[in-house]
Amino acid sequence: MSVWNYVVTAHKPTSVTHSCVGNFTSPQQLNLIVAKCTRIEIHLLTPQGLQPMVDVPIYGRIATLELFRPHNETQDFLFIATERYKFCVLQWDGEKSELLTRAMGDVSDRIGRPTDNGQIGIIDPDCRLIGLHLYDGLFKVIPFDNKGQLKEAFNIRLEELQVLDIKFLYGCVKPTIVVLYQDNKDARHVKTYEVALKDKDFVEGPWSQNNLDNGAGLLIPVPAPLGGVIIIGEETIVYCNANATFKAIPIKQSIIRAYGRVDPDGSRYLLGDNTGILHLLVLTHERERVTGLKIEYLGETSIASSISYLDNGVVYVGSRFGDSQLVKLNLQADANGSYVEVLERYVNLGPIVDFCVVDLDRQGQGQVVTCSGAFKDGSLRVVRNGIGINEQASVELQGIKGLWSLKSSFNDPYDMYLVVSFISETRFLAMNMEDELEETEIEGFDAQTQTLFCQNAISDLLIQVTANSVRLVSCTSRELVDQWNAPEGFSVNVASANVSQVLLATGGGHLVYLEIRDSKLVEVKHIQLEHEISCVDLNPIGENPQYSSLAAVGMWTDISVRILSLPDLELIRKENLGGEIVPRSVLLCTLEGISYLLCAVGDGHLFSFLLNASTGELTDRKKVSLGTQPISLRTFSSKGTTHVFASSDRPTVIYSSNKKLLYSNVNLKEVNHILAIAKEGELSIGTIDDIQKLHIRTIPLNEQARRICHQEQSRTLAFCSFKHNQISIEESEIHYVRLLDHQTFEFLSTHPLDQYEHGCSIISCSFSDDNNVYYCVGTAYVLPEENEPTKGRILVFAVEDGRLQLIVEKETKGAVYSLNAFNGKLLAAINQKIQLYKWMLREDGSHELQSECGHHGHILALYTQTRGDFIVVGDLMKSISLLVYKHEESAIEELARDYNANWMSAVEMLDDEIYVGAENNYNLFTVRKNSDAATDEERGRLEVVGEYHLGEFVNRFRHGSLVMRLPDSEMGQIPTVIFGTINGVIGIIASLPHDQYVFLEKLQSTLVKFIKGVGNLSHEQWRSFHNDKKMSEARSFLDGDLIESFLDLSRSKMEEVSKGMGVSVEELSKRVEELTRLH
Amino acid sequence: MGSPMGNWPSYNPHSFSQVVPADPSAQPSNVTPATYIATHRTDPPPGQVITTDPKNILLRHFYQKSEEKLRPKRAAPDNLTPQNNGKQPRGPVADDGGSQASGRS
């Protein structure tokens, strides 16, 4: 790998942090707006459910998201503030479907201690000001003028230093905030302040309330006319207001962090707690006076981070810890006493605490298995690229040359026959009454020769094209109805047909066009082209699904593809493909209402053109490489949508998403022909997955998995997990090591750990002089009275008969944060120390772990990676250091370190020299070993060579790839590292050759001029390395998400970019498309 | 008041009227809408790039106090109401502001 890295998102963040509802896209439309850390999604409420409209990347981590309606506006505006103290106000322009920036700015202060409890951003219900609490002891005000424009912001000193929540009260003459805070004796109180905008100061507010619940953490302001505020504690819920009304109810102990208002008058609220229980809080009132509080159990959802009441009893539950949900509140409880019915679940991989890359087929294409979710919403998620075929049946059949499916009558919804063509015969399979496939006969068909094409036709007919003839057979009698014979001395080479037309080519460039009229084959036109014909197609793309007015023909010799009109076979367009490779398959198709001509050539490349169906004009030529062997193209339909299957050595589904052609590889080894799929020497029938790029399968655990690893030899996965056990008030956790089958994900075995013992690390490894493969688990005893664990264990398990068998255990003097297989030994990171263990055979034949040597000098050695004799350590707060194991001296010594104070969250060695680290301010950086430096001092320093703000908290790096790597393609040579983050992002770091990096860097800086940050937020600032101590421009890292958005630009913008780069649009698209195939 | 359930607010009676609950055993949906790309101008209207008043809070209080002190002097000759009457309402505000400023800074 190299210093020149390209970072791109393979799976976008899915963890929901905020949500809100309002009329954003038009005064009549109701929208749900969801924030997923660095992105917002805008949905529309429709009769069918939530309709996703757009996904907006934000150059910042969203800290606050609020909709508000300025005076005299008919639509809501969106206020977004980011964790790096930028804010913007967005408005949707319905005419152009654009997000306009109404205001933006920087609200940072030079001096100030960032708040511990997160940033607070609130908007006065009467739209007089925006309030921000970003630094302890300061309240920032951005006032609105009377035209709804924002004015210069100012700070007000806030006496309360430990603020838990601030909200604006409704119905106050002067803007009034209510502050929930903790005093220096840890007691919690609320207090109100009026904001005097003219004096730029606070005035003591109308009321306060001291000594609240010790767990009070959330304020809910109640709209006028009731007014006042609800204070949510861990054991009580309190309502109070300016008239000294004070109502309280006790609740079962829980932590409530999410609420959603149901009624506009504020009489009912939905509350979501930390165990995923949804409650309804009711304010009973008489006229305008609150008379009491009531709380009702509604049911269970994912653990909510945000709750938005949508419409008609339907609620959006956003979650950080599990899948977000759309739920309906029913009037009657179901059998389990739940009023909640889940309508829809939205996948969330976050938090990805750990993952492993499993390459089941050993083809270089990994599937990622993540430890996702938290608490009861914990799960394993199997993420893989490409479309899967779930095999239903398969038979061994050698030498299949072609395969078609036929229906038993024209209007049947399902296929009945399979026509399997071999080099010198054709066989017919049919479904029998028992849904079994058995061989049958279609009398009218010629079974003694290879079939070139088969098709159902109008009037309940079947068409068979062979080298000698075209046969028309009745569906009902299965007997020959009509026949067209190839002229003497000529044989049909290629053919295509639709329900009413047949086009075939014989040697000598003869092209014959037949139509089916009154159950007869009528030769309508015959022409001779100047070269031999290599492929033909007449798939209808016009308005008439039964008749095509265009045909596509691929040619030998001049390597062209031609569009001919039907029925007269006039040449409309000729497109030279260039090169020397003959087109082997052409296809006319319409995807998402756009017509295309696809043309596959013999070396696995595919050309795509936009086709004007009325004029036959071809535009927007693109070339991609799908494989290395000739491709055969065919359309198919899945869930009512048409897609294209390209069968070759690397089968691919071509589909259209947002009017763009996308290619998704199919997880099959080699496919010659499809519908049912003929693999090399095998015929299989399967159902196809949903057509999309990444596929995610969920294995719910109902507990949280923390570490996972794969063991190929035993065909298992093992993971450490824990479960909360709430017995009465006492909360306890039980930790486990569990074993799963790596293919079926069936639970095989469980090993419970001791009381207080946590699983901290797990690897699969083998030792010198022992052929067995073991799972090694590192643990820590986390005792309530200890700050750092002082005791742990290393457990060595063997998998025997699908069970975890504890072979050896070794006590350690601290938490075993990391384990690595190292030179046939075991390397462990234990608190401050790196420790190496030998695997020793005892006299009785059993083994033990024996300490060999170690290395001190870390704060906490949390992450270790090894390569040869080198060890890279990621420290809790001392960045990355490099150690080496010296065999002769049997010692581990430090070679070099990075002297920056980075708090690490993950490390990986990209190669012998370059190491990548992620730290807790959401940055990535690379360091380089300076082994050639002149002085010891320089050699002892890891040089920081790359810096980048990812904006995501990375928990793990792993070498591997989500896509199949073709060894002969340029992209196949690019090494990649996968990472997983708290927000559920799966990303790729690809190390590029220097010249490609330079090219893409130029493209990136050109793109920044054309692709603006939403809300005018700056891309350069967003990607700059940023922590408490410093900020520096991103270097040696490229933003792949920005670069790949080139492909989403309109043609005219692409041309502008191309002009700026001095490179043709086609070349740019090709190079960027290649990059998209890295993930 | 009867059951607190039901009577859920309705803004558009058609919303969600045709929703079919997803099969609980099905995998959660994983649909991301089209990514928005801003190729248009994103700069805000003039005057709407907001910054924070750079004046220190303490200095701001001093200036405010001095302005308040200046104001009654100029107003006094035109004001015919008795002096103590004019002072009283202003007094507590000024005092309060002053004590807050000194108390906090």
Image: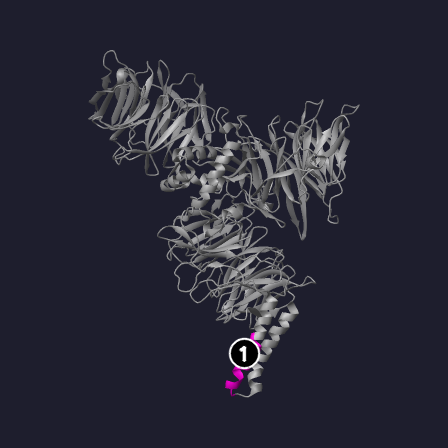
Q: Residue at x 61, y 48 (%)?
A: A1030
Asked if the stretch drawn in magenta spans residue B74, the answer is yes
Residue A12 locus on image (x, y percent): 50, 42
Residue A976 locus on image (x, y percent): 55, 33
Q: Residues within 10 Å of mark 1 (few under 14, many from 20)?
A: few
The relative height of residue A17 versus residue A141 in the rendered view (above or below) is above
Where residue A908 sits, quadrant-wise, is: top right
Q: Which residues are magenta?
A: B67-80
In front: A347, or A442?
Answer: A347
Residue A415 locus on image (x, y percent): 35, 28
Q: Secondary structure at mark 1?
A: helix
In front: A1020, or A558?
Answer: A1020
The relative height of residue A872 versus residue A783 in the rendered view (above or below) is above
User: Which SS does the magenta portion mostly show?
Assistant: helix
Q: How many marks?
A: 1
The answer to whether A428 appears left or right of A277 in the picture is: left
In front: A628, or A1011?
Answer: A1011
Q: Which residue is mark 1?
A: B71
The answer to whether A979 appears left or right of A1048 in the picture is: right
Residue farthest to the right, as pictured: A843
Asked if the stretch drawn in magenta spans residue A852, the answer is no
Residue type at numbered disc 1:
Arg
* Residue A205 visible from this viewpoint: no
Q: In which chain is the residue bearing label 1?
A: B
